[in-house]
Image (cartoon, rainbow, N blue to C red):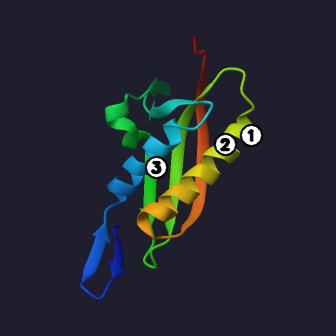
């Protein structure tokens, strides 16, 4: 679903893919996040996604009243406090996506799909 905002000049429509791409770039800047993960349901394998395909690890839903729900599938760094990393991720993404889109973020779910050692 697309988010729609009405202005005095017309209607602005924002696609969920745009929100996903922006949220993904914000997420990978957070400390402790290695990257987005793609889960192969058939094999149960998790793959680290490259920067070009960040949106495959993110699902964005925009409700009829323009409220956003974001689901992240991430890989975190080895040795970090997962709770602290996810709290940081949620607060940064919520603030920046709301500022970027003008729509409130109601829910952010973070699924830790793996741990990687960073050199």
Going from N to C along the chain, the mark reached first, 2 or 3, is 3
Q: Secondary structure at mark 3?
A: helix
**Quarter of the figure with residue 34:** top right
Give the CA distance from mark 2 to mark 1: 5 Å
Residue 98: x %, y % from top left: 51, 64
Residue at 43% across, 61% down: 100
Residue beneath label 2, please?
86
Q: Secondary structure at mark 1?
A: helix
**Residue at the bottom extreme of this rendering:** 8
Residue beneath label 3, please?
23
**Residue at the left extreme of this rendering:** 9
Residue 40 in view of the camera: no
**Residue at the top extreme of this rendering:** 119
**Quarter of the figure with residue 49:** top left
- Horizontal placement of 25 versus 53: left or right? right
Quarter of the figure with the N terminus: bottom left
Residue 28 in view of the camera: yes
**Dot 3 crowding, Cα within 10 Å, few <14, some 14–19, many 20+:** many
Residue 6: x %, y % from top left: 33, 83
Going from N to C along the chain, the mark reached first, 1 or 3, is 3
Residue beneath label 1, please?
83
Labels 2 and 1 touching (C-beta < 8 A): yes
Residue 51: x %, y % from top left: 37, 32
């Amino acid at each position: 679903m697309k988010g729609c905002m009405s202005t005095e000049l017309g209607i602005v429509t924002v696609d969920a893919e745009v929100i996903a791409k922006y949220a993904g770039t914000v997420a990978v800047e957070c400390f402790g996040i290695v990257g987005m993960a793609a889960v192969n349901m058939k094999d149960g394998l998790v793959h680290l996604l490259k920067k070009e395909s960040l949106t495959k690890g993110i699902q964005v839903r925009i409700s009829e009243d323009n409220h956003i729900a974001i689901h992240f599938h991430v890989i975190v760094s080895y040795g970090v406090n997962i709770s602290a990393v996810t709290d940081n991720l949620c607060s940064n993404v919520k603030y920046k996506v709301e500022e970027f889109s003008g729509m409130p973020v109601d829910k952010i779910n973070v699924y830790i799909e793996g741990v990687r050692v960073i050199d």
